[in-house]
Amino acid sequence: MTWQPEADELARRRAFADALGGPEAIDRHHAQGRLTVRERIAGLVDAGSFQEVGKLTGKGTYEGGRLVKVVPAPYVMGLASIDGRPVAVGGEDFTVRGGTSWGSDRRKGGQGGFVEDLAHEYRIPLVNLIDGAGGSVTSATRRGYTVFPGVHGFERSVQLMAEVPVVCAVMGTAAGGPAGRAILAHWSVMVKGTSQVFAAGPPVVERSLGQKIDKEALGGAAVAVDMAGTIDNAADSEGDCFAMIRRYLSYMPQNVWELPPAVACDDPPDRREEALLTIVPRERRQPYNMRKLLGLVVDRDSTFEIQPTFGRAVITTLARLNGKVVGVIANNPMVNGGAMDVKAARKQAHFIQLCDTFHIPIVFLVDVPGFMVGQQAEQAATLREGMRSVYIALQATVPMLTVVIRKCYGMAGMGTTDKNGLDFKIAWPSAEWGSLPVEGGAAAAFKREIQAAPDPAAKLRELEAQLRELASPLLTAEAFAVEDVIDPRETRAYLCRFVDAMQGRLATTLGIKARAGVPP
Amino acid sequence: MATKEVRSEITGSVWKIVKQVGDSVGEEDALMILESMKMEIPVLAEATGKIAEIRVKEGEPVAEGQVLAVLES
């Protein structure tokens, strides 16, 4: 007595699944410069760690009751590990019907699929490797009726955003549901040249609007990442994309009930960088390289920048201080003089919520003259989006540390402080602050006095000089209105000390973050 | 000979033009300095080359994405 015949049949059925859409479809897919979903999973996860679930799914063909072949379901998923930690991973198989959704008893992946339930129930990260166009009108002929939108709803996808890290990688052309699924992520990435993402692709656009546009111009990385910020980062190749996903997850806890992983740090926490003493020019009109500055402060080679090409007036990067994960938000004086525009505000708000959700302390390196001004900025609703980012900062409860490098003005400046917590602000000697800058501010506040003076221009200069004398950060420190002014070379040691000290607080306030109210 | 357009990454005005047509430039050399939000923002050459054209004058307003100069390499 043996079950060998059944074991043989299982092996045969698994071989059909391994064959995906067949050699010709695979060749066509490879010719587009793309890997198959099985190659992608193998490239992403720890070697040999993929335990597939649902490998028997598909449409079998039988002759006289005997199985002839199986066309596998166009979705491959299961449990794997990345750097030794379990993850739920899945992706559409483009070689079977272009990865369109397929009628099964239970969905494997995409919104509401098993792979999402796995991430939710086991509280492990979810990685979606997206390469599909979503629903197909052919499903109506199969069912005999059309389905209501949301039959496969996003409710689980939304729930996951409060619980576990969700990464979405757009690996091919994503439209419709899979494109929507790609957005519901804590971090998203796409591959330059071989992936595009849009609500609807070129044929629908042409029929709806008469616009003739190719898919790269409609939703390639230059649009979706650099211009729109629809997707966070762009990878140079699929291999680069997998390396980025692994790197991103290395900063993330498995879920919101755990602390982000600390690592052993061989970079001395008290390292003093002489370059920090000269990096900010004394001439306050001259900008400097904020990326270089922050790189000198955090653990060596520890940064992973989120949205590096979008909303460039602010830099948002994951990093480590003495091995502990931090989120750094640094204004970039090279773009808009660091002023917060709509894109920077949106990027900063998202990053604050990301850090707050996963209990990652935030370090602000501040050089912000305020919200962006001007006609374009007002037409783009900078004030509203800027206040939205301030609202989200004030709602966050994760500890924040503020280091004022140079300018800290107005509402955008206030949004860089931990008003709900310790409200701990340290400053470099180059720091200056106020409700608004002296330039412009003096002219408005002393308008009548200036106009009445025999030489109005000289009067304005005199008033500005008087006000600037009061602007020394040391005077504010005397009043303890800023908690400390430090030698720039002490920045790393100072921050490491306090980030170390807050670990106990972080460990005792884990869990899902409740957020009430309506952000503007 | 390949040419490359140097575009403004910001909205502002041209404060100072540092290099002239015909000058050779190295990567990261400043071609001109823009003024935006009361800051002097250098426009850097992305590659080594020679300046074929400068399309703006000092004091002129510039928009994000506007071509400022053309490099030959």
Image: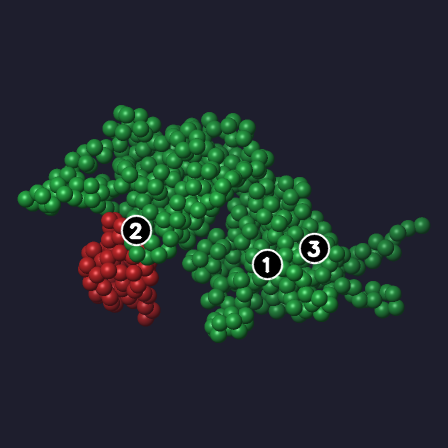
Q: From the image, tell me which residue sits under label 2.
A: A373
Q: Mark 3 and 1 residues: CB-CB less than 8 Å, in contact?
A: no
Tell me the CA gap for discs 3 and 2: 49 Å
Q: Is residue A322 above or below residue B51?
A: above
Q: Position of residue A432 (x, y in %)?
A: 27, 37
Q: Chain of mark 2?
A: A
Look at 79% across and 59% down and name the residue there: A12
Look at 35% across and 56% down and name the residue there: A379
Colouring used for the render: by chain
Q: Position of residue A219 (x, y in %)?
A: 49, 63
Q: Is residue A373 above or below residue A293?
A: below
Q: Nearer the viewer, residue B30 or A106?
A: A106
Q: Chain of mark 3?
A: A
Q: From the image, tell me which residue sits under label 1.
A: A178
Q: Earlier in the sequence, mark 3 or mark 2?
A: 3
Q: From the image, tell me which residue sits under label 3.
A: A107
Dot 3, crowdedness within 10 Å: few (<14), some or many (≥20)? some
Q: Earlier in the sequence, mark 3 or mark 1?
A: 3
The kind of residue on which mark 3 rests is: Arg
Q: Is residue A159 above or below residue A136?
A: above
Tell me the CA gap for discs 3 and 1: 14 Å
Tell me the CA gap for discs 1 and 2: 37 Å
